[in-house]
Amino acid sequence: GENVEQHPSTLSVQEGDSAVIKCTYSDSASNYFPWYKQELGKRPQLIIDIRSNVGEKKDQRIAVTLNKTAKHFSLHITETQPEDSAVYFCAATVSGGGADGLTFGKGTHLIIQP
Amino acid sequence: EAGVAQSPRYKIIEKRQSVAFWCNPISGHATLYWYQQILGQGPKLLIQFQNNGVVDDSQLPKDRFSAERLKGVDSTLKIQPAKLEDSAVYLCASSQPLGGYTFGSGTRLTVV
């Protein structure tokens, strides 16, 4: 089955700086890669996703890049703000029918220092 | 659009007792998932339903966990008997084909 590794487990950055979280996956058939933000005691919220036919996707301060050859994808947050503090999870799956449950990484605790 | 509804929000039981969780997905979402999220970890898929059929239950501990989705809409997840290591948040999610996955708020289970 799929295995997703996520690094770092904790990331502390100064407000206004950029943050990068990296994930690798093992199943070359995986074609859908979402990123979730989870605040303490709350549900995971989708913040951005990318499919394997695209190398990069951007939404305001958030971007995701995908390297299919190396089987890794990354989340980039620019101009970080205090409200960006949360745990971020990457995930992967083979989307498009059949068994498409998400395999998650272990999470990155992002701390924005004022 | 109403979200994924789950109940109860919290449950405390003693080990060896049984417990059930309920989920109502977003209207029209044919696919429903149950995940287990242990504190400090990412969610782990337990079971996936497509309408009322099981698509994937490879990670469900079938000796104690069971789930059903009889009419292809809402679903229940049961644990019997519970163990201490079952303490976790149980998340339900639903999706449309090629659509995003939407999670419910979860049920926080504490087994003492």
Image: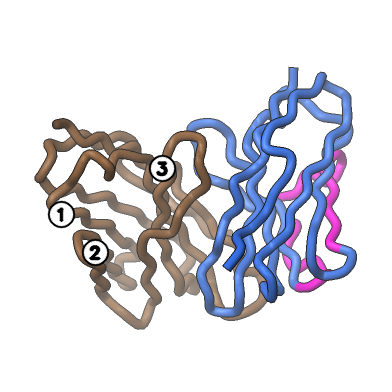
Chain colours: A brown, B blue
Gap in angstroms between the C-alphas marked 2 and 3: 17 Å
Quarter in which the C terminus of chain B is drawn: top right
Q: Which of the marked residues, 3 or 1, is nearer the chain's N terminus?
A: 1
- Residue type marked 3: Gly
Real-space Cα distance between discs 2 and 1?
9 Å
Q: Chain of mark 1?
A: A
Q: Is residue B91 left or right of residue A61?
A: right
Q: Which mark is residue A112?
A: none
In the depicted structure, whether residue B42 falls above or below residue A98: above
In this picture, which residue range is highlighted in magenta?
A: B51-69
Amino acid bearing label 1: Thr
Discs 2, 3: same chain: yes
Q: Earlier in the sequence, mark 2 or mark 1?
A: 2
Residue linked to disc 3: A107
Counting from the top left corner in percent of width and height, residue A21 is at 27, 49
Helix, strand or loop under label 3: loop
CB contact under 8 Å: marks 2 and 1: yes
- The residue indicated by pointer 1 is A78
The crowding category of the residue bearing disc 2, from other C-alpha atoms within 10 Å (few below 14, some 14 to 19, many at least 20), is: some
Which residue type carries mark 2? Ala
x and y percentages locating residue B43 in the rendered image = 56, 46
User: Element at badge 2?
Assistant: strand
Lateral position of residue B66 relative to residue A28, left or right: right
The residue located at (45%, 71%) in the rendering is A32
Residue drawn at x 45%, y 60% as measured from the top left: A26
Pointer 2: what residue? A63
The quadrant the N terminus of chain B occupies is bottom right
Residue A2 image position (x, y, % from top left): 53, 59
Residues packed near mark 1 inside 10 Å, few (<14), some (14 to 19) or many (20 plus): some
| Cβ atoms at labels 3 and 1 below 8 Å apart | no
Left or right relative to B63: residue A105: left
